[in-house]
Image: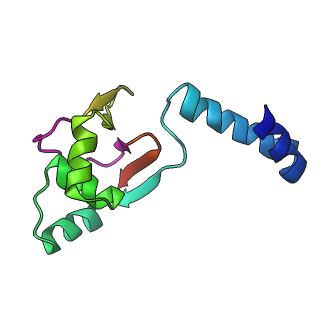
């Protein structure tokens, strides 16, 4: 409520309502965020090949989130990395799993980082 009042005072009622809706959807209902980074599969694959990295889940998460492979592994082991399936459900990635992203798929890394794969 306080955040709503502050945003309403600074940016207006419409901006406050939009921020409130985004907060409820992303944090309270834990739905896929509309604020996701679009990642080109071609560029991701090119980067993995150039850096001589294998396409396992740890490597892809480390590359996307710009974190170390150790941190990526820890996130995966703690069930902090999920993939949106075709039916809209989120599936957790497991350590050691080979992961091949597909166009239109959404990857959630941690609580607040979302990536959508595009051509």
Residue 76 image position (x, y, % from top left): 24, 40
Residue located at (43% from left, 47% from top):
114
26 vs 102: above or below: above
Question: Which image quarter: residue 86?
Answer: top left
Residue 26 image position (x, y, % from top left): 55, 35
Residue 48 image position (x, y, % from top left): 18, 66
Q: Is residue 68 left or right of residue 9?
A: left
Question: Where, quadrant-wise, is the N terminus in this rendering?
Answer: top right
Residue stretch in magenta? 93-109
| Residue 99 can be seen, yes or no | yes
Residue located at (31% from left, 49% from top):
103
Question: Which image quarter: residue 110?
Answer: top left
Q: Is residue 103 inside the magenta stretch?
A: yes
88 vs 17: above or below: above
Q: Is residue 107 left or right of residue 71?
A: right
Which of 79/107 is in front? 79
Question: Where, quadrant-wise, is the C terminus in this rendering?
Answer: bottom left
Q: Is residue 68 inside the magenta stretch?
A: no
| Residue 100 can be seen, yes or no | no
**Please, which colouring scheme is shown?**
rainbow
Residue located at (11% from left, 44% from top):
98
Q: Is the magenta stretch mostly helix, strand or loop?
A: loop
Residue located at (18% from left, 35% from top):
94
């Amino acid at each position: 409520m306080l955040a709503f009042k502050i945003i309403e005072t600074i940016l207006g009622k419409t901006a406050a309502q939009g921020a409130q809706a985004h907060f409820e959807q992303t944090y309270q209902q834990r739905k896929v965020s509309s604020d996701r980074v679009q990642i080109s599969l071609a560029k991701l694959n090119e980067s993995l090949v150039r850096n001589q990295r294998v396409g396992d889940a740890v490597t892809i998460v480390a590359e996307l989130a710009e974190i170390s492979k150790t941190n990526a592994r820890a996130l995966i082991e703690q069930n902090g990395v999920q993939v949106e399936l075709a039916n809209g459900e989120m599936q957790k990635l497991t350590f050691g799993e080979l992961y091949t992203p597909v166009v239109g798929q959404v990857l959630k890394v941690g609580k607040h980082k979302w990536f959508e794969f595009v051509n």
